[in-house]
Amino acid sequence: MVSWRERLNPDEVAGLVHSSGRRNVSQFEMAALCEVSEAWYGALERGDLDRRYSADFLDRVAANLKLSTGERRVLFLLATGREPSARPPSAPKISSAVVARLNREPWPAYLVDTTWQILARNDATQRWLPGLIGEAGGNLMRWVFCSPSAKKQMVDWEYDAHLAMAQLRARFAVAPEHDRLQQLIHEILATSEFAASLWKDDPCIWLHDDGNRQRLLLPGSTKALGVEILSSTPLRNPDLRAYSLVPVAGAIPADCTDAAPANEGDADLAWRATCHPGARPRPRKITIRRAAA
């Protein structure tokens, strides 16, 4: 922490009196910027972990020290042993290289933020899931629960919706003060009676859907397509998540066959043992005390 403070340029820190010859921001000045006593800030800087540092205080420290997302995460883990809540949403910078990578995939590939809002996508996402882009405004959770097309395209919609709600609940437990997440949850619960019943009666959580399998009906098709969901977190911005829907069974589109893995067979038959709602194991149940109003 000392090195983080000492790398600051005092002339670029708002609220400090500019003075020629200054080289560093002092511990006293940083404490004042963070609205705590020098003793309290100094204890954190010395690594005194016997004190209970609030998330609000640590966020002020991170902001005034101008910490990166990774540095902020390290600060929280060292000071509290817990991951920090997601930062208030801002417009993340998405490089042309990331977009190029999405566009190289022949199946849907997209990048979402902490509220499952699509920030970048390839053309296959629009072709395969037009309702996700049109009806739901590019929000994955809104599409699952509020768009009629989701029920038509997701063969096992009820089970997949259980997992989606479990992910929403897990995200809310981590970031209960996230305004846009609260708004999304309120909208979904007000729109979908099924979602409202899940939120009230099914206390499951599901941290991610990497490796999950779904059965989809693509527009104009009457035969199910089995996809495996690949999701990953960009190290440069751990608040984001990249998704790919890789076809592995059933009615694989012709433009995907060269790049897709070997077809595992008819999605309506070969998958029934592992993917059918009645056969797949339920997520582990963990009660979350705090819930949206």
Image (cartoon, grey):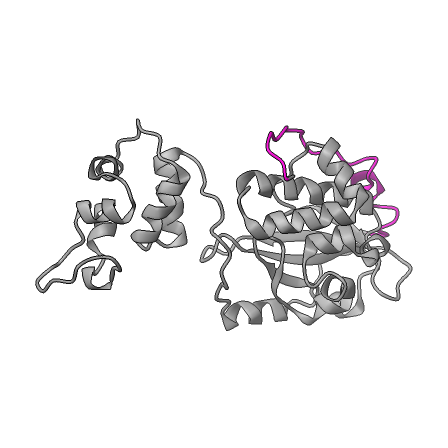
Magenta stretch: residue 270 in it?
yes
What's the residue at 80%, 42% (across, down)? 194
**Magenta segment, prevailing SS (helix, strand or loop):** loop
Q: Tell which of 124 and 199 is nearer to you.
A: 199
Q: Going by the image, does 120 lie left or right of 54?
A: right
Residues rendered magenta in the picture: 265-292
Q: Quadrant of residue 257?
A: bottom right
| Residue 261 visible in the displayed image | no
Q: What is the x, y in percent for residue 55? A: 41, 40
| Residue 54 visible in the displayed image | yes
Q: What is the x, y in percent for residue 198? A: 75, 37
What's the residue at 76%, 70% (across, down)? 255
What's the residue at 20%, 63% (across, down)? 11
Magenta stretch: residue 180 in it?
no
Q: Tell which of 89 and 238 is nearer to you.
A: 89
Q: Going by the image, does 97 lie left or right of 132?
A: left
Counting the numbered discs, the total is 0
- The residue sitting at the left extreme is 21
Q: Is residue 272 above or below residue 232?
A: above
Q: What is the x, y in percent for residue 135? A: 77, 63
What's the residue at 48%, 66% (across, down)? 93
